[in-house]
Image (cartoon, rainbow, N blue to C red):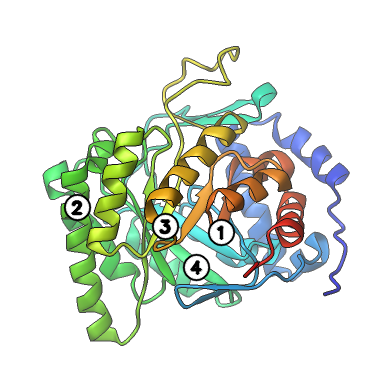
Amino acid sequence: MWYTPPIVSPALYSAAKSLLFQLNPETAHNLTLFGLRMAERMRVLPLLMGGVPSDPVEILGMKFPNRVGLAAGMDKEADTVSAFGQVGFGFVEVGTLTPRPQPGNDKPRLFRLIPQRAIINRMGFNNHGIAAGVENIREATRFNGVLGVNIGKNKVTPNEDAAQDYLACLRAAWPVADYIAINFSSPNTPGLRDLQAAEPAARLLASLKSEQANMAAETGRQVPIFMKVAQDVTDEQITELSRVFLDEGLDGLIATNTTLSRTGAENSPRREEAGGLSGAPLTARSTEVIGAFASELKGRIPIIGVGGIMSGADAVAKIKAGASLVQLYTGFIYRGPNLIRECVEAMKAECPVNS
């Protein structure tokens, strides 16, 4: 299929990135999202970004125009959905959204590790709450792609009550989401990763699947549930969680979230900053975790591969390890929209759908 070449070339994006990287990372992030929203409203984004080759695939009844998505954390408030759709992503995952608004952790909380092509964040689920996020999604009338809504618990909610937060968000997001992602692996909410132990994970997933059945019966539409796991899981945890996911009927898996490890960033002066590391240092381990889950799940649960995708070859490696789809975050910041096109083309050439 023919597609329009972009006006925003890699060289032009590199120049824009050099300017943005002079700013505080969170300021640059907010300014970029504002610029994307303005360009979308002016109807110039398709011209600026060009097209992305078609590479359609259907998974869990959802029809993706291509296999490259935007990971959660970029569009936390779900207020830039239409713009990201026009940038070329085959699907967009917004959030993390929580039942009640919360400010997140103290600033500064976002750091660049430029030589390592990495980021450390300790944002802490800063968002205006699930109701505001859902309203923003409803206003994204020019978005026609697949939309995931990533949900979490409020910081003040104890783990023993976490299920109630996730259920409240599940119900609120149900009318607007194509799939719902359960974030129980962020390192920036104290104690959240404790929910990844087999027993609490099974209890949480059982509650979610029960409510999913209730909502499907009530609304007449099915919304798949994905769970997002950490990169820092052990082989034993992978085996235990895989058993839980299969026993409880999980629809999909997202692997992996950021890491607390500083492997690959040992020489950075930012290595001591608290928070989750993302970007190039995660590439190999994330792919290993995807492969380990794929081996356990044996094709019964589709996997979205995310973590350190900085090139088309990295995306191909995730697919070959067992992922059905991939997501970008840090690579998109360092490489820009050209990375979407590069990943789509590489996967289409080396890992064609239904091959």
Say which residue label 1 marks.
325
- Name the secondary structure under disc 4: strand
User: Do the residues bearing badges 1 and 2 touch, measured as CB atoms within 8 Å?
Assistant: no
Sequence-first disc among 3 and 2: 2
Q: Nearer the viewer, residue 120 or 305?
A: 305
Disc 3/disc 2 C-alpha distance (Å): 19 Å
Residue pointed to by mark 4:
147
Q: What's the residue type where badge 1 is placed?
A: Leu
Q: Amino acid at mark 3?
A: Lys
Mark 4 or 2, nearer chain start:
4
Residue 296 position (above or below residue 158): below
Q: CA distance from mark 4 to mark 3?
A: 26 Å
Where on the picture, by quarter, is residue 112?
Answer: top right
Q: How far separated are the C-alphas under marks 1 and 2?
A: 25 Å
Q: Position of residue 55 (x, y in %)?
A: 69, 69
Q: Which residue is disc 3 drawn over? A: 298
Percent position of residue 192, x then y:
26, 39
Picture coordinates of residue 189, whole percent (x, y):
30, 36
CA gap, disc 4 and disc 2: 26 Å
One can see residue 355 in this view: yes
Query: Label 2, on which residue?
Result: 202
Q: The disc labelled 2 sits on which kind of residue?
A: Ala
Disc ID at residue 71: none
Q: Is residue 78 above or below residue 266?
A: below
Q: Amino acid at mark 4?
A: Leu
Pinpoint residue 270: horizontal percent, then vertical percent. 54, 17
Quick one: SS at disc 3? loop
At label 1, counting other C-alpha atoms closer than 10 Å, the crowd grade (few under 14, some 14-19, many 20 or more) is many
Would you identify the image quadrant in which residue 195 lies?
top left
Q: Secondary structure at mark 1?
A: strand
The residue positioned 49% from the left and 59% from the top of the image is 93
